[in-house]
Image (cartoon, rainbow, N blue to C red):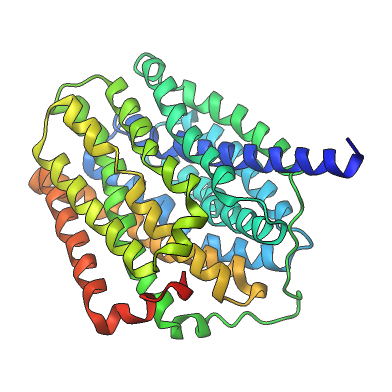
Amino acid sequence: MNTSRLRSIVGIAALTAANGLIYGLNALYYCFIQLYLSKFHTPASVGVLLSVGPLIAIFAPLFWGILADRAKYKNTIMLITVLGSAICYLLLPIDNSFVWLFLTMFLLMFFMSPFGGMIDTITLEYTSISGVAYGPIRLSGTLVFGIIPMILTPFTEKNIYIVFYVYSAVALLAALSIILMPKVSGHAKKSEPVDIKSIFCCFPLMLLFVAMAVSQFTWAYYLNFYPTFLTTELKMPQSVWGVCVFVSVLGEIPFFMLFNRIYKRFSLRTLVITGALLAVMRYLSLALLENQIAIFAAALVTGLSPTLITYSASMYITRHIDRRMIATVQTLLYSMTSGIPKVLAGFCGGLITESIGVRGGMLLAVAFNAAAVVLFTIPKFGRQLSSREHS
């Protein structure tokens, strides 16, 4: 085997590992932070704290995206964010006061917020150039996101602090993978202005922004408040939540294995409507069902629903946006349609939970996703995304 072939294999393996480990870091935060905070603060206070990170995530991803587009290699910026997040995550358990948690979660999300957009941008660009299949590489992120909570939840019931040590170890492995994976260049000149305004004139992209915002708001509410609902109101062990997270990612496996075929065969409009319909079914089930098996069945479409919508938007950006702005627009997508909804899900979610309970919150999620379905079935709005060439 020649040197270039070996280097290529190592690079692809490292890129696959990086995808898995980056999404593993997301799992260690999003699947456990609410359990940690609820030990020390009321639901309303937890809601406020959970909104702090997404608040900075409205602006920080755009900052990192512009840096990535102008950097020699986007990988360098990805590496900085991973190492910065590890330092900030270790600072969290030093003090449980509201003020300390407020400040450290603010700093943590400054580094964590571009994770999804950045690794997706790097992977999608590399695979489109090299001809390597995207789905199997991204699938590693799905599997690690599901496996880590399932393995850790039995231990966190006895000692929640274990997640902080695991995060540091995963972050170091992720940093090593980023160093070894193929380099993906930034394409914008440092002196070149970024024309963000032109993005908001792209009507198909704005429609996708709306759909993703609805999906991410309801998804974030579920992550923030449903775990506590399981353990307190339904009297189930924390291990049930770990299984829920694992089962939720199983639905993504066939999606990523058939990723290229799906986006060649179906229009973005069809995929977005399908994702929103799955969300309606899922939240309705979670609001009404109490049996463990039924909850696991509902969780099966939990991950697939937002994934369908998110990658419809990402594919549109990769194929239709000027390559000098891809990282900027991709991170803008995550900041506006993930950051802002998560702020609202944390702040408003706490108030919703205290006033009408988690069941009421699930029913609100049903209504929001049903509205997204209606929006994309209106011919005037959905027409520009209905042809397969847009996918």
- Residue 200 horizontal/vertical position (percent): 45, 81
- Residue 163 horizontal/vertical position (percent): 48, 26
| 188 and 135: which is toward the camera | 135
- Residue 258 horizontal/vertical position (percent): 47, 49
* 89 lies above or below 184: above
* 349 lies above or below 70: above
Q: Quadrant of residue 343?
A: bottom left
- Residue 365 horizontal/vertical position (percent): 19, 54
| 47 and 102: which is toward the camera | 47
Q: Residue at horizontal 76%, vertical 74%? A: 190
| 312 and 71: which is toward the camera | 312
**Quadrant location of the N terminus in the rendered image:** top right
| 232 and 307: which is toward the camera | 307
Give the side of residue 363 with respect to residue 244, left or right: left
* 22 lies above or below 233: below
Q: Residue at horizontal 72%, vertical 81%? A: 192
Residue lying furthest right: 2
